[in-house]
Structures are given as C-alpha cells and as structure tokens.
Image (cartoon, coloured by chain):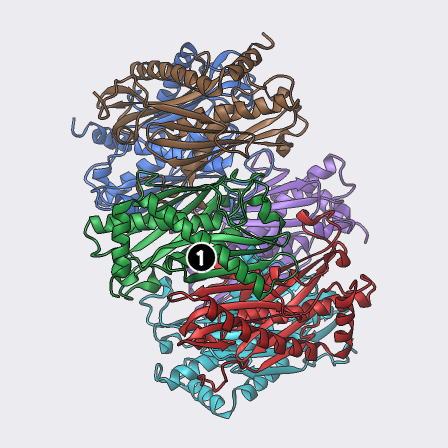
Chain colours: A green, B brown, C blue, D red, E cyan, F purple
Amino acid sequence: MRHDGRAAGELRPVAIERSYLKYPEGSALIAMGDTIVVCTATLEDNVPIFRKGAGGGWVTAEYAMLPRSTKTRSLRESKGRINARNLEIQRLIGRSLRGVVDFPAMGERTIWLDCDVIQADGGTRTAAVTGSFVALAEAFLMMKERGLVEKLPLKGYLAAVSVGLVNGAALLDLDYKEDAAASVDLNVVMNGAGGMVEIQGTAEEGTFNREQLDLLLDLAGAGIKELIRKQQEALGEEAVHLIESACRYGE
Amino acid sequence: MRHDGRAAGELRPVAIERSYLKYPEGSALIAMGDTIVVCTATLEDNVPIFRKGAGGGWVTAEYAMLPRSTKTRSLRESKGRINARNLEIQRLIGRSLRGVVDFPAMGERTIWLDCDVIQADGGTRTAAVTGSFVALAEAFLMMKERGLVEKLPLKGYLAAVSVGLVNGAALLDLDYKEDAAASVDLNVVMNGAGGMVEIQGTAEEGTFNREQLDLLLDLAGAGIKELIRKQQEALGEEAVHLIESACRYGE
Amino acid sequence: MRHDGRAAGELRPVAIERSYLKYPEGSALIAMGDTIVVCTATLEDNVPIFRKGAGGGWVTAEYAMLPRSTKTRSLRESKGRINARNLEIQRLIGRSLRGVVDFPAMGERTIWLDCDVIQADGGTRTAAVTGSFVALAEAFLMMKERGLVEKLPLKGYLAAVSVGLVNGAALLDLDYKEDAAASVDLNVVMNGAGGMVEIQGTAEEGTFNREQLDLLLDLAGAGIKELIRKQQEALGEEAVHLIESACRYGE
Amino acid sequence: MRHDGRAAGELRPVAIERSYLKYPEGSALIAMGDTIVVCTATLEDNVPIFRKGAGGGWVTAEYAMLPRSTKTRSLRESKGRINARNLEIQRLIGRSLRGVVDFPAMGERTIWLDCDVIQADGGTRTAAVTGSFVALAEAFLMMKERGLVEKLPLKGYLAAVSVGLVNGAALLDLDYKEDAAASVDLNVVMNGAGGMVEIQGTAEEGTFNREQLDLLLDLAGAGIKELIRKQQEALGEEAVHLIESACRYGE
Amino acid sequence: MRHDGRAAGELRPVAIERSYLKYPEGSALIAMGDTIVVCTATLEDNVPIFRKGAGGGWVTAEYAMLPRSTKTRSLRESKGRINARNLEIQRLIGRSLRGVVDFPAMGERTIWLDCDVIQADGGTRTAAVTGSFVALAEAFLMMKERGLVEKLPLKGYLAAVSVGLVNGAALLDLDYKEDAAASVDLNVVMNGAGGMVEIQGTAEEGTFNREQLDLLLDLAGAGIKELIRKQQEALGEEAVHLIESACRYGE
Amino acid sequence: MRHDGRAAGELRPVAIERSYLKYPEGSALIAMGDTIVVCTATLEDNVPIFRKGAGGGWVTAEYAMLPRSTKTRSLRESKGRINARNLEIQRLIGRSLRGVVDFPAMGERTIWLDCDVIQADGGTRTAAVTGSFVALAEAFLMMKERGLVEKLPLKGYLAAVSVGLVNGAALLDLDYKEDAAASVDLNVVMNGAGGMVEIQGTAEEGTFNREQLDLLLDLAGAGIKELIRKQQEALGEEAVHLIESACRYGE
C-alpha cells in the first residue's frame, strides 16, 4: 500500500477547472493531488519565422514554477539564472501538444501555452500537458465560435502521466515523496486512442529491462484513459461533441 | 455611478484566503474584484550583507505577473527583458511592509515576500501589499509557535489601496477600466492607526492641487480601515489577539 | 540650524549651465550643492511602437550614476546587475517631464533624456528632473529654430525638489547627510503654476500625518518656484519668452 | 536499402580516438559517419554544494555546437540566446553517465564532461554520450594512476544510439537526412549488460505502439553492443582490464 | 637554444588543412605546434545595417576557445560571463582580414569568420588570422565558382605571427611557455608584400625601445613569409593562381 | 595645415584638473580639445583571487562613454549589449597603467580606475590613460599620507597619445575628423623616460611600412613628453617631488 493509501494503479484526486481566468482565449486550472498548475492558451495572429509560408499554424509552450511552489524557495528566472529543467519541460509540453494539432486547419496562427506551477508535489510536467490540452481545446473552441476556423484543429485527445518503480513496485502518478524514492521514472504522453506520443524513462539507480518497461506502460495507459475522461468532464458535452467530430474529420 | 455599480467610496468585493499553499511559512490568496494575487512569505535564517550585525532581521519583496494575467500576453522576465515596472512595485511592497516590522524582535532572519499576480484588473500593487501583510503575519505566527521569537515582530497592521480622480470624481479602489481613464492616480499605504507609510501620486493629465489630494486621502483612509477588517477576518481571532498584543508591546 | 548653516526653507547653491555639451540637441549641467548631474536631450525622428499613429511625440528618460559618484564605488550596470533604484528613478523622470509636454505639437518624434550623475550628495532624482527640463527646452528651441515645430511643444515649466522631516523639523532640499537621518522623505514635482505633477512620500521610520504632509508640500512649493527662476536664468530671456508664449498657446 | 547503402541494423563508420587533447584528464574524439564530437573530462577537487558531505563525487556535462557545425550558421550562446536544446541534451548526457559511476569510490571530486560538436550529421547527443564514456574512463584511469582512487569508480560500460521509424522501417543510427524524415525518433542509453539507463522517444508524426517500440529497442541493443566494442578498442587492453575488474568489484 | 630546440627565427611545425568541414563555404584546420584552431567562413547574402547601400560587402569574425583547450577549464560564455579577451581578439581578426578584402567586388554580402580554438599553446590569435585567410579564400573561390563574383574579392595574402623578447632574446612564434616568460610580446599581421596591417606590442615588464622593435619586426616579417607559403601549399596551385590574378587586378 | 590650424606635431589644448570629485581617493578631469574624460581611482583593501598571496597589489580599469558623448546617441550597456570596443579599451588602460606600478610597494590592495567619457572628439582612450595616471598618482599620494605605504608605488610617469597618417602626412593627437580620414592609426603609451609600454597600430586602408612607423613614433614621443609636463603641472610641485623620489627608489 502506498503512503497515502492509494492502490498501485490509482491516480491522485484530479480536478480540472475550465475557463479559470478571464483574459486568455483558453485556460484551465489542474490539480492532481497537491500539484496545482495554471494553464493558459493565448492566440497570436502570426507564426514564427521558420513556419512562415508553411500553410499552417504553430503551438509552443512555456513552463515555470512560482518561487515558493516548492519546499524551498527558488530564485526567479528574471534573476538571470537559466533554469535548464524548465526549458527541458517546456520543450516536452510543446512537442506533445503539437502531436494532436491539425496545423493546416489552424491557419497562420500561433497558440502560446503557459504552464505556471502554483504548487508542486510531483508530476508537474505531466499535469501541465493534461491541463494544457484543455486550455488549447478552449482556445480552438473560441476560434471556431468566432469563425476563424471551420473545424477544431485537433486530431485527438492528449494527456500525460508519470509512472515509476518504487521499491520494485510499478506505481501510477507518483507524488513527490514517491518520485524521490523511485529507481525508475517514466513520463508517458498518449493520445485518446492509446498511441504513444512521447516517452521519457530514466533509471535513477541501476537500470531497467523490457519487462519492467511493459508493466509501466500498461499502468500509464490506464491512467491516461482516466485523465482523458476528466478532461471531457471539464470541457462539457458540447465541447466533447465538437472535438470528436474534428478528430473523425477526414477519416 | 461607477460602471460596475459601486459608490465612489466603495471597495470591490474583497476575499482573502489565509494558508493558501502548503509549503510556505505564510501565504495568502487575495482577490479584489477580478484582481487576484498569490502572496507567500518565506523564512530564511540569514540576513543580507548590509544588515549583518545590525542586530535584527529584514523583509524584502518580489513581484511578478503571470504572462497571461493581462489582456495581452507579456513576455516572461526569463527572456532577459528587464521589467522596470515590476522592480518599482516590488520596491514599494518591501518598503511598505518594513514600515510595520519590529526588526530587532525578528532576530537575524529574512522574510521573502513573493507576490505573483494571477489576474490583473487594476490595483495589483496595493492588493499585493494588503495580501503580503497576511502572509507575513502568518510567517511570524509560525515563528512564534516554533519558539523562534518571543513576540510577533509586528508594530501594526498595514494595508494599501488605490484612489484616483476619474472625470473629476474621486473614486476608491480603481479597476483597470477606471485606472485607464483617471487623470490622477494615487496609491496609499497606511497602518492600522491611519498613519501614512507611503503615498505615490501621479497626474496622468494636467496636475492636481491640495484640495484634491485631501479628498483622495480621505477616501483611501476609509478604504484601508475596511481592508484591515478583512485581514483580521482572514487571520482569525487568535491571530488577531496575538498581533494586537505585539503591537501594544513596549507602549 | 542645519549642519551646513542653511535655514529650513533654503535651497543649496544652485547652478544650471545650459548647452554644456556640443553634440546633443539639448544639454544642461545642474549642480545643487555637491550633487552634479549631466542632462542631455536627444532627438529621434521616430516614436516607440505603442505611440505609432497616435498623432504625436514621446519623451522618455534614462538615469544612471558614475561608479564613483558615491562614497563607495558601485558596479557598472554593464556587469549584468539590474539596478532597480535607477529604473524606478528614470520612470519618475520620464513621467514627470511628459506632464508638461504638448505631444501633438512635437510631431512623431521622441526626445531621449539622459541623466548621468557625476557626483551624488542627495536629491539626484529631483536635480535630474530640474536639469532635464532645461535640456528638453533646449531641444525644443532647436526644433523650432530648424522649423520642425511651429511652437515649442511645452505646456509649462517643471522642476522638482525633495523635502523631509529630520528630527521632527520640515526641511527643504535634503543633502545626503540629512536624507540619511530623515524619518519622512518626500519628492515633489510641480509645474510653473504650482500644480502637483508627482508626489512620492515614504516614512522611513514610523508614519506621517496630514498636517506634516501639508507642511512639507508648502516648503516644496516655495523651493520649486525658486528653481524655476534658476531655470529661466539659465535659459535666457529669449528662450523664456518663447516658452511663455508656448504655454499660453491655446488659452 | 538506406540512402547511404547501410542495412537497417548497421551503424555508420565509427571512429573513437582516445587522448585526443593534451591538457584534459581525459579526452576522446568520436566520429559516427560525418558527426564529429570532441569530448573532454576535467577533474575538479570539489563537489557542488548539494553534494557536499554526501560522501562521494559528482559528474556533470555541458554540450554545445560550433557555430558552423551545421548547414546554416547558428549564433554563439555568448550572444545571450539561451539554447534550450543544448541544455536538454547536456542534462541527458550528465544523467546517463552518472548511471554507471560509483560515486563513493570517486571521493569528493567532480568530473566535468564537455561535449563540443565539430560537425553535426544526426545523432550528436548519442555520440556525445558514447564519446564521453571514453573521456570519463580515461580521467578515472589517470586518477587511479595518481593514486587518488583505489579502484576505477565505474559500475559498467555505457553507450548510446538513436533509432527511428523512417517510412515504416525501423533503422539504427539515423543520420541527419533520415532523422528529418523519421516519424518516430528514439534515443537509447544502455550499459554493458544491456540494461536501459535512459530512453527518450518522440512521435514526430502520429503515434507509435508497443510493437514498434520493441522493434526499435532490439535494434538499439545490438548497436550499443557494437559501440561498446569500439570503446574497448579505443581504450586498449590494459584499460579494459581495469574497467572490468572495477565493474566486478563488490559482486 | 629554445626549450623545444628551435632556433630564434624558427616557426613551430605548421599544418594547414583546407576544406576541413563539409558544411561551411570555407574552412581550415590550422596547427602551429600544439595550438589548433578550426576556422570557418560562412557566406550571408546581406550586410550589416551600417554597410547598407555602401556598395560592397563586409567581413566579420568571432573567436572562442573550447572550455578545455587550456590547462585549466574555463567557463563557457553561455554562462553569462563576458570574455573581454575573446572580444578583443575577434576584433583584431576581423580588422586584419578586412585589410585584404576588396569590398566592392564582394557585392552586398557578409562573410562570417569563426575561429574556435581546440587546443591553446600560445599564438592562438595569430594562428586564427592565418587560418581564417585560408577559409576566407575558400569561400571566395566558391563564390567565384558559383558565379556570384567576377574576380576573387582579395587584394593580397594575409598572415600573422607573434614575436617577443624572452630573457633579452628576440624569438619568433612563441609557445605558451615562452609567452609566459616574455618581457615584450608583439603580434604582427602583414600582407603578402610585407606591408604591416596591424601591430600590437605590449611590454609585460619594463618597456621596449625602437631597436628592439626593429629586431622583432624583422623576425615577424620572415615568419609571415613562410606562413604565406604554407597557406599557398594548403590552397593548391589553382587557387593560388586565382588569388594572384585577383591581387594584380586593377594594377 | 590641419583643419583646426594646428601644426603636424601639435597637441590640442590640454587641461587636466586634479581632485575633480570629492569622494574618490584620486580623480582627474582631462580635456584634450573637445574630448573630455572623468578619471577616478578607487582604493579597495583586497586583491582579485589570481593575485592573492602574490605579495602585492593590482590595478584594473573600466571605460565607458555617456550615451550622448558622441554625435549619435548610443545605447547604455545596461541594456544588455556587450560593447566590445569599450572592453578592448579598458584592457589597454589597465595594462598600460600597470606598466608603471610597483606592485609589491602597494600591499595587497587594488586600485580601480574608472574612465567615463563625457564628450568624445577622438583620442578618448589615450586621454583616459593620461588622465588615469593623475588619478592613480593622487590615490597613491593619499595612501602615503595615511601611512598605508612607505613610498609611492610608482616606477615612472605614463601618458598616451594617438598619431596617424592622414592624406600621407603624419599627425599628432588626431581629433575625430582626422581620425575618420586616417589611413593608419597608432596609439602609443610611453613612460617618462620615453620607453614604449604599448603600441597599437592599424592600417585602416592599405598597409604601412617601417619608415612610416618610425615617423609616427617620433611624433608620439614628443607629444607624450609634453603631456607628462601637463600632468606635473596638474599634480603640483609637492606631488612631483614625491613621485620623482619614488621613481628613483632602489636605483
């Protein structure tokens, strides 16, 4: 049994609140246990230089933590310290979300995803991916409503979760305490059909083998399915209907 | 009548939530209308070099806005852009709070106040001062509980509010729309006894005279009294009792 | 009596030299006692993006101190340290000067005001405002001479002074020694008609009340009147005549 | 057949030159096809703060590319641009190498691994891991020779390779052309016993499933075995002997 | 006799390899003894703002050292430290090479010269000048081949060498050991006709007189002649022929 | 005849004011024609790490220009732009002054020389060297007065001047107009005995030969002699006496 009473394959309590803020085109507050992330989606009528003339849009992400989202206070990045971990994470978020976006359908526009961690108790990067999907979907819904796009520029749902080996046991959705004790740590991003979009596995101690990897991917798959149900609840029936028709589009 | 139906001397709905986050020694979420600021207080067992050996503590503040707390997205400061407005505001917050701190009673310790704006609808700097007082008081309460200090190192309550002249009328607690239309903008920080700790007034158009200044300071005084009542409600009876005995201390 | 023999309402010796440098469109060297500031005004045939198409000009300021303008040497800003105090001051200078500029009359042009402190003995920011007015006026005079503007784009004179409470006494134009001992410090910017453009008051110790504020504003008003006479002497009769007709323009 | 005539499971020509430079404690030049990386290992008699008193050493890595190692010239990082890709890669290199280091056996020392790409034709990060192992081993051999350590502080060999799906085919050791065309890209780091230390897989287009992942991991395993043989050839018999006895140590 | 057996007027073994890398328009690897520098030339179809409309091209240089090219590891510049020595050297390289370029013949194009030191044993800046000439000539040859220019935009050969006084003796091409012991250090850049393009002499101890300067310039002249022969060997007969006709052009 | 009526070997009017500022241990204002530089010397009771335990002191310099010291306004360095020219110049100033300092006699102390250009009309770097010598001498005189050193830590006088070839004529002390037209530009630093401490010559167009170099060095030598007389006048008889006995010391 886990220190907080969860079963090995059980997520922490998940709460996703759509439209959390009033200014952004899309926004979501996601809590997975004590991990809390504000995700916003900002629409810009432009694409970066390397995408000009490519006949479609772009999605990019930024990730940061409030100084006291963690046990000890961290320096703000404005203090000139480059935070390599943040940069690595925001590249993962951007790459993952781009995996389910229909760029030609977006037109020459960019969505900026901002993920700001209010409180960090493990799994902030995967929570940021899951929450960003909701903010992104909201921004696309708004674009459709305003007539900027004909269909939602989405090819599928997307969510992420962490799994790991702790004292030899494969566990879903590690909190900070478990993460610190894990010998293997694997972040998995999947779409609604269970296809893998990104996997990142690290042995913190020793190595891992194919069997262990399989076990971890099974757990992750089940967890992501549940997270996508939570995204659907947060988005509401009408949004789900529009997303699903967009995903079927072109089949 | 104001665009949101308020009277000239009426605050927006104020909500202050104490202990908003689990890690910091003190924290508060303050909402004044649609302006939302997370304030945290972090204890460090050290003082900056210029305070070493001065026989007491220090309080310093940092202020930032989430990129999409505003109508248009702003660049993160990690992108190397110096944000002079943020620096000016954090200097005001630190200076103001230091005005009610009993440094010798703190011991050689520093409190870092972090004010992060989640949503900005005018008056973020004054909301940050008011919220920071609650986070600071919480950190001091924790220090007393842990036996680090004998009495709360506080000399009084502290809150802040903006006032301004809009179309010739003196108004309390301007929201963004009013602020943009104001000819004079005045930020006022007062302690619980109505003494001024800081005033900053700017004529955005034309100038202002002594009579207008008096009118604005009257409005601000009343507003700050009400804000201190809100701080007391958020802190709770026991905390209020301890703060009050600390403030009377030495009389 | 003050440590340098001045009366409470007496300025330090003031010297303003117009056209101090040969390249800038306007320049002034201002000395208030041992405080010395070089002010220059640079004309740029362009406005910042946020002013494009607004049908008028812009005025902005920068402020810095030579490394050894102070008792101890300070690091140059090129060393990557952000100097928040400098940024706060330059925002004050820019805001203040903009208070007396007739933007539509400037055309789509920018004036850059550079204030560089050669020696600092208290009151550098107010000396910078007072000196910048002369540099700005010179640049406008040159623009009129070259036929770039029909009238001087000025709506009034502008000067600034510091006042403060030192050992309970209200004093005008604090030098460094007095400033360090002051319990309240107030910087006041007024136009030629005595209207307030900016006030910034801080209680360094305790608080201040309305009566004290009134006393300080009286002192400041008298000091600023005298400073404007000094500006007029430095500018010379012909310039004064042109400024005055510009200020009356449109009445 | 691949564009350069290789079979699906064939590495590009691999050349590893030990002791490439005269100053560093360890160094290697690794070429995988046209990808060329200089790897150096620098010994420092110190550990970072977070490792002090932990009773052992540390290994950290930095990675950069010469401006014209690529088809188009890139800006130097000294120009103030943060290169997030480089930071992500150097975190991977450091994490991977730490996976086979026996920290207590190092003593309180740090090895800095510097990986500088002279020419980039795909797979620079995996070449950097493979080359860094040789530089690190050299530095450890030197430490043993100087009597700083009793045994080589190594727990195993380590090498890395990229694999990917290109037009549906699983290929080993992608060059730039193949990488650009790949729908799935997987970087794999394994130790000498075939245990996984790190895997990073990304679907550039669509998603990938478990079957495809298995295929790719098989290819990677075979490639890494061969790379470790190349490392052994470069290091020479005596070094191999010492590494192997270090790895068996404690069994 | 010198510590490595050379005569006073003898260069270290010189090796110049043309076309060292596959992507740049021009590249050379130069070794002078243990000093190794990679020089590349990148063609850009543009000129910097200050050269627009001047009817010709531009050549600029950047210089850096790999962190472990020296006895002790140096911080990478991306760490935010400005390296004034590198900046001084790259200004020297750019200025020197511009001395033999026929700008009007280049068209509105820029060549970026990148000099990256792989191993530093004294004389890296002069090796960088000598190697850059070869990379630059290669880029110009390629431009001619592609029909971008009618003639090579060169007015002469260019090479550089260091000379110095060590224990009273004038020596050619100092290595690091000699450089550290030199009382006078002189870097000389000359063209193929022996005309001086740049000289930089520094007395590290005491001063130097005209006689000593003459002695050093004699040595340098002979060394540079030999270096130009090495450049010609590296470039090959055909290139030499084209360069020579370009240099005679217009006589 | 030169555009300002000077003879080929004539300096511009030179004015050196000792003790220009009240805080620094040494300071001088130097004007050479319209070029004006403030030089200050700051004493620090410490040496940089690389000088610790070397049994002596250190001298280092910084150089900057006020934004509007030139015809067009330049960006402040605090804006994050590295100014390579400034860095090159400050390295020259520090190196030159160190050439006449008796480090063991200084004790473990550092002098910071700050050279800030108020107005630039050519020759700012050489004016900065000449003025810095006066500021440095003043700081040493103060150290002797306070009993920190037994003798002035000086081995000689030091001054610098620029010379150049303009339309084939060798000219002393170029102003900006002449500098812009010069085909060869040479900066020379000499001590009181006419020994060369540093020479930096650049052909802006074509090359220069030994004969021309000799001519230029002759002019420079005569100019520097005159500049040293000006330094002596500024320093005054008593200071000159002390400097001369310090320079003879140990003979």
- Regarding residue C195, the answer to whether it shows in the image is yes
Quadrant of the snapshot with the N terminus of chain D = bottom left
Specify whether C58 is left or right of A35.
left
Is residue E171 or residue A89 the one in the foreground? A89
Apparent side of residue F36 relative to residue A150 in the rendered image (left or right): right
**Label 1: how many Cα within 10 Å (few below 14, some 14–19, many 20+):** many
**Residue B96 higher or lower than A98, as above or below:** above
Q: Amino acid at mark 1?
A: Val
Q: Position of residue F177 (x, y in %)?
A: 41, 58
Subunit ID for the residue under disc 1 = A
Does the rendering let one see residue F85?
A: no
Examine the rendered structure and indicate whether residue A195 appears above or below residue F40. Answer: below
Which image quadrant is residue E155 in?
A: bottom left
Looking at this view, is A208 or F133 the one in front?
Answer: A208
Task: Decide which of D119, C48 is in the foreground and name it.
Answer: D119
Measuring 24% from the left and 65% from the top, which residue is drawn there?
A250
Quarter of the image for the C terminus of chain D: give it: bottom right
Looking at the image, residue F239 lies above or below residue A101:
above
> Residue beneath label 1, please?
A189
- Indicate the quadrant where residue A152 lies: bottom left
At 68% from the left and 45% from the top, the residue drawn is F110
